[in-house]
Image: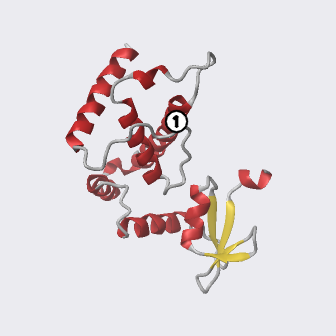
Amino acid sequence: MAEQDKPLLIKRYASRRLYNTETSDYVTLEDIAGFIRDGRDVEIIDLKSGDDLTRQYLLQIVAEHESKGESVLPINVLTDLVRSYTSQAGSTVPQFLAASFEMFRDSQSKWMENMGAANPMGSMNPMANMPGFEALQAQQEAFLKAMTGGMAGTTAPRQDAPEEGEDLEAIRKQLSDLQDKLSKLDK
């Protein structure tokens, strides 16, 4: 288990081949993406110079997925990222993105726990009786699956998922209504 705590060391040889030091075999970018989806941190080092190439390879993985139509980043986010490289705000963008993704991961974990977990008295989550809850839960599961490349485990079965032909506007309205109800509960 101690090996899982430290990053998986990948060495890049002069031939540009990537070598997994734990399993003593060569890996591809898709293999590295799989390690990351499985929750493993990686560190990619150039064998000759000792330079850390992790950032470069992670960006390459994202770029390849985006170019295959597996878009996660909206155009406006990509545009803002490009702008951040040429503006004074660039110094705060990395910290903001890191904090945002950490909050996102935490909220997704809590959301999935709450959606599928039974309370100590044995009854299901009280939110399950709210109108539109099932549709929201189905959308959340689809979003998590898209964000994690299909690796997200779900803790509750999909109930009453929307039909393929169901109007997107109706789903948006249900989501809006549910968000309004949830904001009232927080007060």
Assign the C terminus to one quadrant of the image. top left
Residue 139 vertical placement versus 63 (above, below): above
Left of 42 or right of it: where is 70?
A: left
Left of 75 or right of it: where is 161?
A: right
The picture quadrant where one finds residue 29 is bottom right
Left of 1 or right of it: where is 144?
A: left
Which residue is disc 1 drawn over?
A: 112
The picture quadrant where one finds residue 25 is bottom right
Which residue is pictured at 39% across the width and 37% down the height? 160
Residue at the bottom extreme? 15
Judge by depth and name the residue closer to the eye, 59 or 39: 39
Mark 1 packing: few (<14 Cα in 10 Å), some, or many (20+)? some
Give x and y (percent) for residue 142: 42, 47
Give x and y (percent) for residue 14: 62, 85
Give x and y (percent) for residue 128: 44, 25
What count of labels does the image hold? 1
Residue at the right extreme? 2
Judge by depth and name the residue closer to the eye, 151 or 27: 151
Color encoding of the figure: secondary structure
Which residue is pictured at 34% across the width and 47% down the height? 89
Residue 114 vertical placement versus 89 (above, below): above
Residue 119 vertical placement versus 159 (above, below): above
Give x and y (percent) for residue 42: 63, 61
Report helix, strand or loop for mark 1: helix
The picture quadrant where one finds residue 47 is bottom right
Which residue is pictured at 62% across the width and 15% down the height? 121
Residue type (three-letter) at the residue carrying disc 1:
Met
Judge by depth and name the residue closer to the eye, 41 or 109: 109
